[in-house]
Amino acid sequence: MAYTPLAADPAAPPVRINLLSDTQTRPTPAMREVMARAEVGDEQLGMDPTVNALCARAAALLGKEAAVFMPSGTMCNVAAELTHCRPGDEILAHETAHILTSEGGAHAALGGFQILPLTGERGQFSAATLEAALREPSRYAPRQALVSAEQTANIGGGTMWPRAELAAVARAASAAGLATHLDGARLMNASVASGVAASDIAAGWDSVWLDFTKGLGAPLGAVLAGSRPFIDEVWRWKQRLGGAMRQAGLCAAACLYALDHHVERLADDHALARKLAAGLSQIPGFEVQTPDTNLVFFDVAGAGLMAPHLIAGLRRHGILLGALGGRVRACTHLDIDEAMIDETLDTIRALARRA
């Protein structure tokens, strides 16, 4: 099936309210200024001072020895898997994990790994569930090499793993001799919402990455962190996957600006998500998951609607939302304000009444 862009309909009006994802954020004027003034150099040779500053800061933020700048979070996941695992190995992750549902089968295509899906509510699995899935080593079964978790859990509803549960999962994996990898696409959302430092969330996990292109609002970039020997091996895979980014300080400057100016304001996104969820829950027939952070998932079947039909109706009003697993998903971010939430709610109410 060919891929059709969401905004490809020539009859649809321009998108005015983009709640599709926090990846839709655009660099602010101040961020663009910082990018224009950035000191740059050759990242491959370790001579880009802005990239070096970002990696050092991100490693400290995440409580790790070293870090490497990557174009995307997906590339962080792929490079981490390729470093931790060998062909034929098995990765244990939640059945809705990004590495399983949304990365084009990169684990199998590039590494020859398989993923054992674990069950659990809200996109999370328990240490007990992990322990039950562990096997005694056998020549007849793949070697279990890596446990991966996602903070926050996207398809689970943007839910936050409790710090104690994440730590318990990491301990169980380590006790069984498995490496651990934390997908930190929205880790700073979890940190701000819970009040727990990012380094404490990532404690006990061998590798972790932080995305700058979601709620933090940068146009490009993620940073993968871990021990220094691990990052040295990640660099080998980065080279194999495409190499260094020349003069990447332009993008790293945006990420540093985001750390300085866009972390604390994530709380505003969370407040808007709660406002949206509260309004949606008052619509008869809507089933709304209470948001932990900036993602709002809701089911509209009880109102006589189908998710694709509601999304198409909103698109005709210049409002863009998405769907995952049969539910509608709205994502608040720095380009969304309270008036946009009010307009979105008014439009959804009108479409529900017509249904």
Image (tube, rainbow, N blue to C red):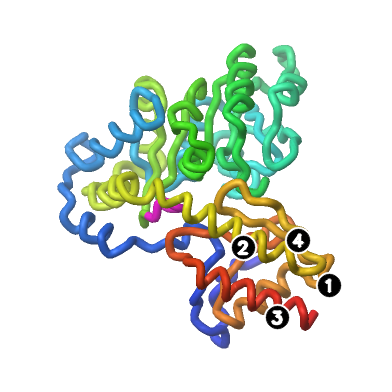
Q: Quadrant of the N terminus?
A: bottom right
Say if mark 4 contacts mark 2, CB within 8 Å.
no
Q: Position of residue 225 (x, y in %)?
A: 40, 30
User: What amino acid type should be assigned to the residue bearing mark 2?
Assistant: Leu
Label 2's element? Answer: helix
**Residue at point 55% right, 25% down?**
180
Alpha carbon of mark 1 to alpha carbon of mark 3: how far? 13 Å
Q: Which residue is mark 4?
A: 299
User: What amino acid type should be assigned to the residue bearing mark 4?
Assistant: Asp
Alpha carbon of mark 1 to alpha carbon of mark 2: how far? 20 Å
Q: Which residues are magenta?
A: 213-217
Magenta span: predominant SS is: loop
Q: Nearer the viewer, mark 1 or mark 3?
A: 3
**Residue at point 59% right, 71% down?**
4
User: What amino acid type should be assigned to the residue bearing mark 3?
Assistant: Ala
Alpha carbon of mark 4 to alpha carbon of mark 3: how far? 17 Å
Alpha carbon of mark 3 to alpha carbon of mark 2: how far? 15 Å
Q: Nearer the viewer, mark 1 or mark 2?
A: 2
Q: Nearer the viewer, mark 4 or mark 2?
A: 2
Looking at the image, tell me whether mark 3 or mark 2 is earlier in sequence order.
2
Q: Nearer the viewer, mark 4 or mark 3?
A: 3
Looking at the image, tell me whether mark 4 or mark 2 is earlier in sequence order.
2
Q: Which residue is mark 1?
A: 304
Q: Quadrant of the C terminus?
A: bottom right
Alpha carbon of mark 4 to alpha carbon of mark 2: how far? 14 Å
Any part of residue 331 in sight: yes
